[in-house]
Image (spheres, coloured by chain):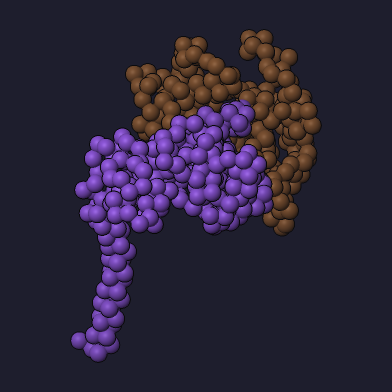
Chain colours: A purple, B brown
Amino acid sequence: MTDAYRFRRFVNAFMLGGAVACAAVCVAVLFLILAYVFVKGASDIDLDFFTRNPRPLGESGGGVANAIVGTVMMVALATVIAVPVGIATGIFVSEYASPLLGNVVRFIADVMTGIPSIVIGLFVYLVLVVRTGNFSGWAGAVALAIIMLPILARSSEEMLRLVPASQREAALALGVPQWRSIVSVVLPAAQRGLLTGSLLAIARATGETAPLLFTSLGSQFMNLNPDKATDALPLRIYRYAVGPYNEQHAQAWAASLVLVLLVLAFSIIARVALGRERGTHP
Amino acid sequence: MATVSEPRTRPETRQQSRTIEVKDLNAWYGSFRAIRDVTMRIEPNLVTAVIGPSGCGKSTFVRCLNRMHEVTPHARVTGQVLLDGEDIYAPQADPVLVRRRVGMVFQKPNPFPTMSVFDNVAAGLRLNRLFSKRSQFEEQVERSLRQAALWDEVKEKLNQPATNLSGGQQQRLCIARALAVEPEVLLMDEPCSALDPVATLKIEDLMRELISLYTIVIVTHNMQQAARVSDNTAFLMMGPDRAGELVEFGDTHAIFTNPKDKRTEDYITGRFG
C-alpha cells in the first residue's frame, strides 16, 4: 500500500465517521426530547387529565380538557380558512400565473414563512383583538391560518407541478376548458400530495404558541365559543411551566407529551401517505 | 352549422369537408421564430404526413392546427388556419371549441392515471358537461373503442385503471379517447415512436381505416412509415435562420420517387437528417 493510498483511506474514514456522527447527533436530539418528555410526563396522564378543566392555582388534580378542546377548535377553524386559500394559491401559481407573476407570489410566500410567529400574533392582536375589544378563539384561528397559509401555498404548488404536463395537454387537447382540466385531471392526480401538505401545515399550527399569546389568550375554563378567549395546549404548557407550583410543572410535562404525540402523529401519517404516493407513480 | 365560436350540432347533420387550409403560418416561442410562412392545404379524409429532420418544427406546426401551441407561455402564432373555411385564430374563435373539432394524440401515451379505461374514453365527453351519468356514455365509449380497434381487448377490463394496459394498448386508448368527442381532424404527433413494431403496425392499419371518417395528419421522423401510411406528404426543414419552412408538399408517392426540390431528395435519400 502506498502512502497516498493509506492517507486517502484515512481521510475517507474520517469524513465518513464525522458525517455519521453528525447525523447521529441530529437523530439523537429528537429521541432525547421524546424520551425526556415521555419519562417526565407519562406518569401524570390519566383519564382525569383528558376530561377535566384546570383546578385553581395551587390545587392538585384537574386536567387540560379545555386546552385540548381549544387546540382542536382553533386548529380546525384555521384549517378551514387556510387550506382552501392555500391550495387555491398553489393552483394559481402552478396553472394560471405567468412565470414572472408566479415567481413574485412564490417569493412573497417564502418571505411569509420567515416572519416570526410572535409578530404574526401581534398583527392579529392589533387588527382583530383591539378592534373587537376582546381576545377570542377567532383571533387565534386567524393567526394560525396566517402561519399555515404560505406553507400550504408552497407545498400545494410543488405537488401540482409534479403532475406531468402531458396530463394537462391530454385534457386540453380534448377540448376541455382549463378550469375543468384542473379540477378533474390535475387535482385528482395531486390529491395525495395535497393532503400530505395539509397535514404538515396542521401539525405546524398545532404546536404554535407565540401567535396565541395575544390573540386567544388562554383561559381556565372550557370554551366552545370562538368569540371568547380560548385555551390551547401550547399556551397551557407555557403558563404551567413558568408558574411556581410543582403540580403545574408535572401537568406541563404531561401536556407536552400529549402535544408532541399529536404533532408526531400528524407528521408520520403525512410521510406515510406521501411515501405510498411516490411508490405508485409510474 | 358548426363554427369555431359556437358549439356543434349533432354529427348526422354535419356536412363537413374536414379540410384544413394553412395560410402564411408563423409560430414563435418568445422572440424565436420556429416556423416561417407555411402555406398548404390538408385534404379531407386522407392521411397527410409531416416529415423533416429533428428540430425543424414539425411538432410545432401540428400543434398550431389545434391551438395547442399557444398553451406554452410566451408562444404565439400569426397567419390563418382555416378549418372548413373558418379561421381558428379569428378573434371570436374559442380555442376550446377548436380543440373539440381537431383532436390530438401525443408521442408518449398519456391516459389519465386516476381514471379507469372507461372513464378515460369518456373523459372528453364527461368533462364538457357539468353533471353526467356513466350510462349516458356506454354506447359512445364502445363505439370509440371499436373504432380504435381496442374493444375486444379491453371489454372485460373497462373498470380497471388505464395504466394496467400495455404501451400499444394505451396509445390506442388515447386514440379512442380523442375519437370519442367526434372530431373532424385527428392530429398524431409521432404516435408510434414509443411503441414496439407490432403495436406500430396495428396503429398504422388503424389509420388507414379511420380516414373513412376523419382527416388525419401525422408527424413522423420515420420516412418508411410516412411512405407506407400517408397519401400526401409535407417536408419541413430548418432554414438558415433556424425557422422551419415548408420545402415541398404533394402526393406521397411522387415525393418519394420523384421529389422536385433537391433538399427533399437529399433528406429522403438519407444524405442528412
Name the outermost residue toward the top.
B12
Q: Quadrant of residue B150?
A: top left
**Can you say which quadrant of the picture contains the N terminus of chain A?**
bottom left
Q: Quadrant of residue A12?
A: bottom left
Foreground of the two, B214 or A26: A26
Residue B144 image point, x, y percent: 49, 19
Depicted A62 relative to depicted A242: above or below: above
Q: Residue at x 38, y 55 (%)?
A: A243
**Can you say which quadrant of the picture contains the C terminus of chain A?**
top left
Depicted A49 relative to depicted B139: above or below: below
Foreground of the two, A93 or B100: A93
Q: Quadrant of residue B89?
A: top right
Q: Residue at x 58, y 28 (%)?
A: A180
Q: In this figure, what is the number of numbered marks?
A: 0
Asked whether, in this view, residue B102 is left or right of residue A163, the answer is right
Residue A254 image point, x, y percent: 29, 48
Residue A76 image point, x, y percent: 46, 35
Q: Residue at x 41, y 51 (%)?
A: A239
Residue B41 visible to the viewer:
yes
Q: Residue at x 79, y 32 (%)?
A: B91
Depicted A5 relative to depicted B78: above or below: below
Residue B181 image point, x, y percent: 57, 21
Asked whether, in this view, residue A121 is left or right of residue B101, the answer is left
Residue A80 visible to the viewer:
no
